[in-house]
Image (tube, rainbow, N blue to C red):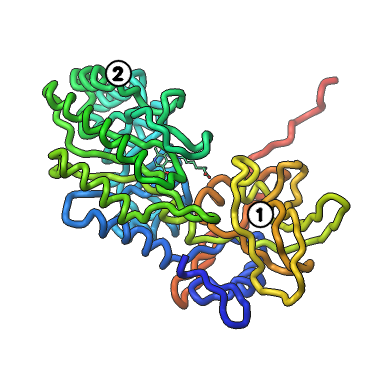
Amino acid sequence: SPFLARDAAGTLTLEGHALAGLAHEFATPLYVYSRQAMRAAVTAYQQALAGRPHLVCYAMKANSSLAVLQTFAEAGCGFDIVSAGELQRVLAAGGSADQVVFSGVGKTRAEMRLALEAGVRCFNVESEAELDVLSEVATAMGKTAPISLRVNPDVDAKTHPYISTGLKGNKFGISHEHALAVYQHAARLPGIAVHGIDCHIGSQITEISPYLDALDRVLDLVEAIEAAGIPVHHLDLGGGLGITYTDEQPPTADALIGALLAKIDARGHGHREILMEPGRSLVGNAGVLLTEVLYLKPGEHKNFCIVDAAMNDMARPAMYEAWMGIVPCRQRGEAAQTWDVVGPVCESGDWLGRDRALAVQPGDTLAMLSAGAYGMTMASNYNSRPRAAEVMVDGAQVTLIRARETVESLFAGERLIDGHSRL
Ligand code: LLP
């Protein structure tokens, strides 16, 4: 991110703020985000889509803190949600339901009711069974549910199997072969109004070609669906654009969208509204996770650098063996040694980085890079660890956007059992 820099004195800064200073002020583990980086990322999408009807729906599972949502709402974004909880967050942050698309394979009736009541823009329906339930719920409320079907184009996004979603073996979407029949079924249901078509093939995608393959298959379907007399208003092309963690070279949003629009126009679909659901590429490189070095534990086989952030704060390395950059906030002159950077959680899988060359001492602050996406949203309270605080910088303004969780709040909903226990 151009907003993250190292100054002449070797101090790492985000929008000019020394990160070690923020760690000192707000304590660690601490997430720090650049609001300007988020704005720049969304502007790139919006400018590439300018001149035709479009809506960028930020996939808020990447980072759903209220101030982050507020930032995107103010930038004119809609939101891609996957639960009632996410809808409530959008509303609490000042977003409007009519710019929300509701994805996910397991929407409950209660979630459907809440979304219909709020008036979401579109349900991205993932199965025929869900479609029938949605029609029933909407009819009972005297409403019609706007839908698109999420189709599974069966293309390989060439990404990690855990975050690839567009292949036949995935739980997501409706298979390409069944899609037309399900659209015909949808068109006959009383509580359903067909608005569009939707497709999302995976995450951390670093090539354009899988997107173009998926788009071709989606457009084939749109033509077949319209030939069957069912108008398809919008194309939702999903999210998934990758970011640079180490040496990946994903296309820019501009390049990706340029290629997509060229195909859409060439195939005569230029009049359609375009929706997209980017998550990671809007926030990933806007954030860092700051952590303090607690102890150094050099060993025969491995040197361990034990820090105060752990897998409960950032699950990606433990879950996907994801590589994320780890750098000191203030450079030391000493020679680097090789360390495994690990947290205090009682799991061997609790590591943040392996075999990293670092010159560190206890008390130093390290920054884990590209931590703005799928960091805080995937945090847990394992080992009764309160979740980290979050800070947003925006030029001169520094805001604590989420207070560090307290231990008391972790067990506030728990109860001891009354009376004498029976043996
Ligand atoms: N739309 C749908 C329907 C999705 O399932 C996702 C992500 C997105 C949009 C946004 O994708 P993005 O632009 O962020 O790639 N926790 C994993 C990533 C899981 C992605 C799940 N779906 C990770 O940390 O890599």
Q: Which residue is mark 2?
A: 178
Residue farthest toward the bottom in the current orientation of the protein: 8
Q: Residue at x 78, y 61 (%)?
A: 294
Q: List x then y, in percent, for residue 25.
A: 64, 72
Circle 1 crowding by C-alpha within 10 Å: few under 14, some 14–19, many from 20: few
Asked if residue 418 lies left or right of residue 73, the reply is right
Asked if residue 191 lies left or right of residue 378, the reply is left
Q: In the image, which disc is placed on residue 406?
A: 1
Asked if residue 402 lies left or right of residue 236, the reply is right
Amino acid of disc 1: Thr
Q: List x then y, in percent, for residue 308.
A: 72, 57
| Element assignment for label 2 | helix
- Location of the C terminus (image quadrant): top right
Circle 2 crowding by C-alpha within 10 Å: few under 14, some 14–19, many from 20: few
**Nearer to us in this view, 202 or 43:** 202
Q: List x then y, in percent, for residue 109.
A: 39, 26
As measured in the structure, the alpha-carbon distance from the residue carrying label 1 to the one carrying label 2 is 49 Å
123 shown above or below 324: above
